[in-house]
Image: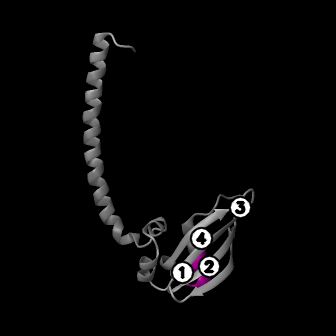
């Protein structure tokens, strides 16, 4: 994977640097956001947690993808400007939220399994009743 910065523009109003880039990935799939983030952080000498990749679009029939990324000066600036789905897609500030989400998922999964077990028992009873009545197989 070879990363090339095409355009770099400062945006002082939003406290960020906007970057257009191109990735050559001969014989590989379109690179994941994390890999591109790591390479951009290395090239620009910034913390990778301050980089948000807006998109990576592969070229049709080519092993070249183009993309757009934003490097913020602080996490607060990014949270203030970026929509929540972009932050989520980039796993922005996820270290703190992971623990809370895990607890929520565990409780939801526990409830779901109980409900599904009850439903399967009811469905089995209904099937037995249909067979006794002579229903279609």
Say which residue appears at 53% left-offset and 89% top-offset: 12
Question: Would you name the residue on which mark 2 appears?
Answer: 19
Considering the image in quadrants, where does the N terminus appear? bottom right
The residue segment tinted magenta is: 39-45
Question: Would you name the residue on which mark 4 appears?
Answer: 36
Relative side of 51 to 131, left or right = right
Q: Earlier in the sequence, mark 2 or mark 1?
A: 2
Question: Would you name the residue on which mark 1 appears?
Answer: 71
Looking at the image, the residue that sits furthest to the bottom is 12
Q: CA distance from mark 4 to mark 3?
A: 16 Å
Q: Earlier in the sequence, mark 4 or mark 1?
A: 4
Q: Earlier in the sequence, mark 1 or mark 3?
A: 3
Q: Which mark is residue 59?
A: 3
How far across and how far down the image is residue 2, in percent?
69, 71
Relative side of 137 to 100, left or right = right
Q: Quadrant of residue 9?
A: bottom right
Q: Residues within 10 Å of mark 4 (few under 14, many from 20)?
A: many
Q: Is disc 1 placed on a helix, strand or loop?
A: strand
Say which residue appears at 59% left-offset and 80% top-offset: 18
**Tag 1–tag 3 contact (CB < 8 Å):** no
* Pair 4/3: label in front: 3
């Amino acid at each position: 994977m070879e990363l090339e910065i095409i355009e770099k523009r400062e945006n002082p109003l939003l406290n960020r640097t906007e970057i257009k880039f191109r990735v050559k990935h001969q014989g590989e799939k379109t690179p994941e956001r994390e890999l591109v983030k790591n390479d951009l952080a290395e090239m620009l000498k910034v913390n990778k947690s301050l980089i948000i990749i807006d998109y990576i679009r592969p070229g049709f029939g080519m092993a070249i993808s183009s993309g757009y990324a934003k490097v913020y000066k602080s996490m607060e600036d990014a949270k203030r400007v970026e929509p929540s789905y972009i932050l989520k897609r980039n796993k922005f500030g996820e270290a703190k939220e992971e623990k809370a989400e895990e607890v929520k998922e565990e409780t939801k999964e526990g409830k779901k399994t109980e409900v599904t077990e009850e439903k399967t028992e009811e469905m089995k009873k209904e099937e037995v009743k249909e067979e006794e009545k002579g229903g279609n197989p």
